[in-house]
Every structure is written in C-alpha cells, then in structure tokens.
Image: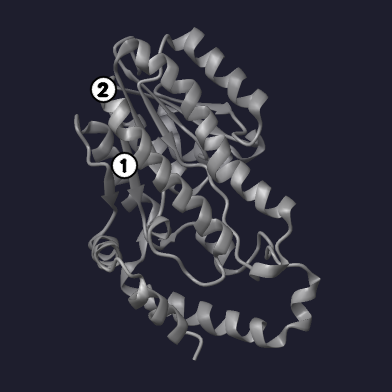
Amino acid sequence: MSNENSKVIVITGCSSGIGLETAVLLAKEKDCKVIATMRNLKKKEALEKAAGNNLNRSLFIEELDISKEESILKFVKETINKEGQIDVLINNAAMGQIGKFEDVSLQQMQNLFQTNFFGTVRITQEVVRKMKEKRSGKIIFVSSLAGIEPFLFGDFYISTKFAIEGLVGCIAPLMRTFNISITSVQPGPVKTEFQTNISQNKQGSLSTEDEIHDAETKALMGKAFEKFMAALGPGWQTGKDVAEVIKKCVQNDKPDLRVATSDFVQKRGEAILVDYSGNTLTETLANTLI
C-alpha cells in the first residue's frame, strides 16, 4: 500500500501497451504511488485486471485527455491538491498514423500534433511549475527511435516525435538548474496495440480518398512498409521490455538525456547521429522503393 513518503508518479496513456505495463510495474515498487491516466475510462478494464491487488492501493486510475486543455488543468490541480506534489511525470500518450504526404489535411495534422506534442507540452508545463517550487522532479518522455530516424509515409507522426526530441534538448539544461531531470526514452518496434494499429492501419490512413487514384504511390507505400517491417525483425520488444527501461530511469537519480530501450535502437541511433549529411539514410530509404 502506498504511504505519505511514496513517489507520486503520473503516467499518461495507460489503457494499453507501454503505459499499462509501466503503471503495473511501478505500482509493485514499495515507494511508488502510480496515478495511471487514460482518455476514456471505459477502456480501464485491462489495466484493472493487470494491476491485481495493487489496484486502489498503489495504482490509481484517473481520467485525463491530454488533447484537451480543460482536462489537463483539472487533472493537475486536483492531483496537486490531493497529493501535494507530482514527483515523476511519464509522458506516454500518443497516436500514430501513416499516409500519403500531399493528401493530409490541416485538421488531420493538427489532431496528431495536439495529442503527440501540444498536449504533452501543456501537461509538462503545468507539472513543472510545482516541481520548480520544490526544486525536485523527473519528467520522462516516451519518444521513439522515430524521433531521430524517419521512415517513409510516417511523415506527420515522425514530425511529432522530432518535435518532442527538440523540446527535450531545449528544456533539459534549464530544468537541471532546478534539480529536475529530463529524459527521452526511445523504443524501437514494440509489440503493442499501438504498433498493431499502425501496421494494420486501423486508425485510418491520414490520406484522403484521392489516394486510390495515385496507384504508383500506393504501390510504393506497400512495398516500403513491407521492407521496413522486415528490417525491424531483430529489434522487436514487448511493452514490458520498455517498461523495465522506464523503471530504471525512474529509479536513477541522474538518468541520461536520451535512453535507448535496446541495443538495436542504440546502434541505429548512433548510425544516424554520426552521418551529419543525412545522405546515407536518405539513400537507404529510397532503395526500399526499388
């Protein structure tokens, strides 16, 4: 059971996948009180079942839609009033889609950025205010290898992850002055509902009906995605694997700014970062279309 000395940990996007696994794992730690949030409480059954005896003892489920300003403000205010603090914020909530670049509407782009970037920024801003007062805290962004390595037809999802990486790099030095650590955890391919939705395009392509008239691009998208998935073969992880890495970041007094969740991610990331020209990656991706 949690106590007054427990770390108060808020996690977004906990209805499934990495968020669910991280919430369950951290709730098993004696010094952690986990507030697992999700947009739709009708989807809480899986988390309740996985939490077992820790439900309403060290793991508590709350509603939070980070795409809505009023939901963020209400949640942070009520949590601070009740708990007195938020020691760790784990920004996990995100959505992912693929599609044809020129057919994406402004509204579709905005919807993606609202959850993956702006909503994440807003809850971080509100939580940071209290952390700065206490001169203590930890913020972990569940980013992606996609934040440094693009893939074809993931244009706007990738853009949101690049934006997160830019944000992390900017705020980390300042927050260190206030004893607040900032970390970007970068998973590669993960076997979760999130990844399945992208793979099977269940969330809907960002492209419009016009795509059907562009047979060449449609064929290239299928070819590129097939080769991309094959190339990820040795790198697949589970949500539990990623949760273990996140737990280590929570427990580490001084976690790194950027943390790969596997050797696969580490090696691919290093290869990208040493090629300043970007030519190698561009040629590699172009070759997947041949």
Residue at horizontal 36 percent and vertical 66 percent from the top:
236
Q: Is residue 224 above or below residue 158?
A: below
Residue 276 point in image, percent of width and height: 30, 66
Q: What residue is shown with label 2?
A: 177
Residue at horizontal 79 percent and vertical 74 percent from the top: 210
Mark 1 sits on what residue? 246
Q: Is residue 34 above or below residue 208?
A: above
The front one of 13 and 47 is 13
The residue sitting at the bottom extreme is 290
Q: Which residue occupies 48% across, 12% down?
A: 80
Camera sees residue 21: no
Which mark is first along the chain, 1 or 2? 2
Binning the other alpha carbons within 10 Å of mark 2 as few (below 14), some (14 to 19) or many (20 upward) gives: few
Count all numbered tags in the image, as a single digit: 2
Q: Residue 156, position in %: x, y?
A: 58, 58
Q: Amino acid at mark 1?
A: Ile
Image depth: mark 2 or mark 1 in front? 2
Q: Say which quarter of the image contains residue 50.
A: top left
SS category of the residue bearing label 1:
helix
